[in-house]
């Protein structure tokens, strides 16, 4: 250990761990130990179990950063988040107890990036390529966006109706990067999440994937969180 927290990065739906590559390079260059595992997206229980598995491998306090549904996964750690010293939401869901993704998304018009999802015979939801390039990753070079689409991991549809338990952000300090041009999670919804969790907040003119189009800003917010929690034992990392 170099006295700095470890970093665990949690990808969301229709993405994978490689979407963090620009952020990983910057964090590693700054001397951080970084892990960006793959998540099955088969159920919230399975995804939280994978996150816990990775957290047990960390050798000290850890900052967890989640993008989109990845924020939902880390929120679902609840009050039992061993080694976790802080949470960083990157254009991510930050639901409160009893809320579900489906209920939240039903409160307004379907965001452009989610209008044409299709479900396969096994109940997994996929993104069409055109919508992915034009809306989901709108400010990413189209060739890169097509490569991201090719590597997308679909998400099991029952995840959207699962209710959140006690959210981890109620007992852990939080940071939030709002993507002001997001066409998947409306920016005002992101501001609401950030406000009610009392997060340290910054905004960036990005699509739904700011860790890809603005990796410097995403990495900087994660570093800010890590620096704020440096040398704070995990047992004392609660708000």
Image (tube, grey):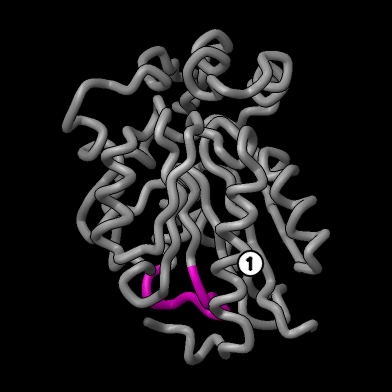
Residue located at (46% from left, 49% from top): 177
Nearer the observer, 130 or 181? 181
Q: Which residues are magenta?
A: 78-86
- In x, y percent, where is residue 30? 78, 64
Return the residue at label 1: 53
- In x, y percent, where is residue 223? 63, 64
Does residue 157 belong to the magenta stretch? no
User: Looking at the figure, which quarter contains the C terminus?
Assistant: bottom left
Is 9 left, or right, of 45 in this rendering? right
Is 53 left, or right, of 18 in this rendering? left
Answer above or below: position of 150 versus 221.
above
Q: Quadrant of residue 157?
A: top left
Q: Predominant secondary structure in magenta?
A: loop
Does residue 83 belong to the magenta stretch? yes
Label 1 neighbour load within 10 Å: few <14, some 14-19, many 20+: few
Residue located at (64% from left, 36% from top): 212
């Amino acid at each position: 250990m170099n006295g700095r927290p470890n970093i665990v990065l949690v990808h969301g739906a229709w993405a994978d761990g490689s979407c963090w590559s620009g952020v990983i390079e910057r964090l590693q260059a700054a001397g951080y130990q970084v892990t960006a595992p793959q998540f099955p997206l088969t159920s919230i229980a399975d995804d939280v179990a994978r996150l816990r598995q990775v957290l047990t491998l960390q050798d000290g306090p850890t900052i967890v950063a989640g993008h989109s549904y990845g924020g939902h996964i880390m929120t679902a750690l609840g009050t039992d988040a061993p080694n976790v010293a802080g949470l960083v939401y990157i254009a991510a869901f930050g639901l409160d107890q009893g809320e579900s993704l489906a209920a939240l998304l039903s409160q307004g018009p379907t965001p452009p990036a989610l209008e044409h999802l299709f479900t396969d015979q096994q109940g997994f939801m996929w993104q069409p390529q055109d919508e992915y390039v034009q809306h989901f990753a709108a400010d990413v070079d189209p060739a890169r966006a097509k490569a991201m689409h090719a590597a997308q991991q679909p998400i099991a549809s029952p995840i959207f109706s699962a209710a959140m338990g006690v959210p981890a952000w109620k007992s852990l300090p939080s940071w939030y990067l709002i993507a002001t041009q997001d066409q998947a999670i409306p920016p005002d919804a992101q501001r609401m999440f950030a406000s009610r969790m009392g997060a340290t907040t910054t905004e960036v003119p990005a699509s739904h994937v700011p860790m890809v189009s603005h990796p410097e800003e995403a990495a900087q917010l994660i570093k800010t969180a890590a620096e704020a929690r440096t040398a704070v034992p995990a047992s004392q990392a609660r708000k």
